[in-house]
Image (cartoon, coloured by chain):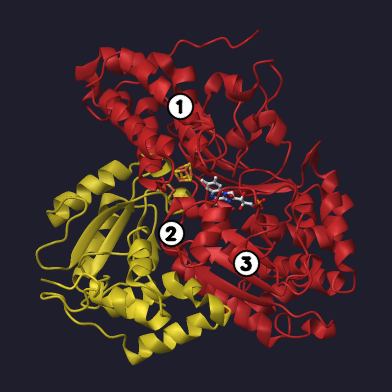
Amino acid sequence: MSRKLLLEHIDKPGIRGLEGYRANGGYRSVEKSLKMTPDEVLEEVKKSGLRGRGGAGFPAGMKWSFLAKPEGVPRYLVVNADESEPGTFKDRYLMERIPHMLIEGIISSCFAMGAKTSYIYIRGEYFYVARILEQAIAEARAAGWLGKNIQGSGFDLDVFVHVGAGAYICGEETALLESLEGKRGNPRIKPPFPAVKGLWGRPTVVNNVETICAVVPIINDGGEEYAKIGIGRSTGTKLISAGGHVNKPGVYEIELGIPVEEFLMSDEYCGGVSGGRPLKACIPGGSSVPILPAELLFRTAKFETRLMTYESLSDGGFQTGSMLGSGGFYVFNDTACIVRSTWNHSRFYHHESCGQCSPCREGTGWMEKILYRLEHGLARTDDIDLLWDVQRRIEGNTICPFGDAAAWPVAAAIRHFRDEFEYHATHPTKVKDPKHFEKEPMKRVERSYAG
Amino acid sequence: MEDPTKPVTTTEGVTPFELSEKALAECRMILERYPAEFSKSGLIPILHVAQADNDGWLSVAAMNAVAALLKIQYIEVYEVATFYSMFHLHPVGKHVFDVCRTVPCMLRGSDDIVAHIEKRLGIKAGQTTADGQFTLRMAECLGSCGGAPMLQCGANYHEHLTTEKVDELIEKFRAIPERSNYTDQ
Ligand SMILES: Cc1cc2nc3c(=O)[nH]c(=O)nc-3n(C[C@H](O)[C@H](O)[C@H](O)COP(=O)(O)O)c2cc1C
Ligand code: SF4
Ligand code: FES
């Protein structure tokens, strides 16, 4: 059994309430951190090697140290609870089941940053989770863990929950800040970064829910202890949301560094591919990361064991690798159609584009149209090249990384499954049945990626 | 000739709207979270309150009332209300089924669930039943892929759907005259 730092107590009775949470060691990290100096807390987080769990994997301690501290200007911690990357559902699990852990993490984090106000920006669909958080905040405040002069330390902190209203792009940190200011979720041009000009133009740190929760064990056990878990620059534990064609969908906490094969096949985690069917592909880090064909999932192109780490999952770059991303891990067995999934993803990105940049606004629509034609038996083989061309012109030409996130999955699907795209162009009658591969899986020739 | 400098407040056919006392109290609580000079930050949470207060959708009159409350331009409300998928700009049924259609749900059978609901309710996605009881909508990933296939109705998530479960849900909600709102406790 691997170590659990975030989910250790998640099934304990009463853990959602303050009393049950306290009975399981809750708020110990705050007792400890408030006796340290803010810089000492920051130092522990730096030593832990903790990297952002929202998708980009930026070192949390480094981000905090960039926070501008002009005299007399309030600064903020904004917790990103937008969780809308398809395939990802870990933050909801944490907030719904053990809400005090997030509050506990927020207190030490704000203390380190010198922030006296924190907002939790939660996606609107999670309204019921927002209520759970609000209740936990009220409990914590009544018990002196929030508000003025927390536990006699002289440190003041208010935490507020702010609900969004349904827009994937509001997970992007600057769109999130716009939305929190009561505007459309249009990402800002960076620089300036939020650490300098964030919420209401003031210095702001934006961190994912899981990142902030991880601060709790880091303070409790020390940054060095945390850094002992994992491999290289992938330290600590990570929540993985497992879905799609797996036997046991759900949220799992892993020690970074376990083999991908173990995660997918062992009964401790996913319990294997559903239906006992052959594995076709996997998206290991949420819809925005490249899809990996079965041949590249358990081993890299260099025939090394593929591990659940930031580095190993991206080994091989975009040619033969992917990314850990948000940890939204979803699996495709041989009945899945890669063209249909890619079309579905591109429809998602078209729907969710904020529309500020033409390559993204128009390109996502064109990709959706071409993929619709392919999937429905209305396209020709040269449409595949057209699709390749469109995605290539989006990447790198937009204000925010959404454009890349829309283009990469299309590029990877064509790169690894061109045969399936060609099949769609040449077998129009067959693919007009939406369940074409469910009824008769396509024979795949195993590809060699060596060399 | 209409005066273009005057906002459309109570054009014909638009029911006038005022926030109820209960809704106003909720709005005041929301506004306590932000510094007074940045009260516009309360816009999205307040639009949720207004929507629940206006039979589940945002009419022009309802949006104008929110603008007046926050002392901002009408356009600042309209441009936000039109951006976010949870705001309904047209009347909707008492119970809105938001069925997730994104890949992780699709892999676990959401297409069949949608087809089944369409058949049972006799409407297509995006439509409302003639009796005004149900609206069916397609949603993008609702952060519940582990419970796929799933749908949201009001504040509640319904997970691991099967056609039988969907039938039960439809029967249940057919008998509930009160509207399901996202903001329900
Ligand atoms: C299109 C897009 C969507 C994103 N969605 C989320 C999200 O839902 N949740 C999240 O925590 N980060 C999301 N991010 C990443 C945030 O911009 C930001 O990097 C993150 O919240 C920083 O927190 P971390 O360093 O703790 O990961 C998204 C980024 C992009 C470009
Ligand atoms: S890349 Fe797309 S989502 Fe990002 S700012 Fe441009 S149009 Fe908006
Ligand atoms: S894909 Fe349906 S909830 Fe995530």
Mark 1, other Cα within 10 Å: few <14 / some 14–19 / many ≥20: some
Q: Are tags 2 and 3 found on a single chain?
A: yes
Identify which amino acid the numbered label 2 is placed on.
Answer: Arg
**A22 over A298 or under it: above or below:** below
> Hue of chain A?
red
Colour displayed for chain B in the image of the structure: yellow
Q: Give the percent coordinates (x, y) of residue A299.
A: 65, 21
Identify the image quadrant of the N terminus of chain A.
top right
Q: Is mark 2 within 8 Å of ligand 2?
A: no
Q: Which residue is found at the position 77% from the left and 67% from the top?
A: A70
Q: Determine the residue positioned at 89% across, 74% down.
A: A35
Drawn side of residue A428 relative to residue A45, left or right: left
Camera-nearest residue between B96 and A393:
A393
- Rendered image: mark on residue A393: 1
Q: Secondary structure at mark 3?
A: loop
Q: Residues within 10 Å of mark 2 (few under 14, many from 20)?
A: many
Q: CA distance from mark 1 to mark 2?
A: 26 Å
The reply to whether discs 1 and 3 touch (Cβ–Cβ < 8 Å) is no
Please tell me the numbered disc located at residue A98: 3
Residue at 71%, 32% in the rendered image: A311
In the picture, measured across the screen, residue B118 lies left or right of residue A385, that is left
The image position of residue B73, as x and y in percent, is: 37, 72
The answer to which of marks 1 and 3 sits earlier in the sequence is 3
- Marks 2,3: beta carbons within 8 A: no
Residue A184 tag number = 2
Callout in the foreground (1, 3): 1
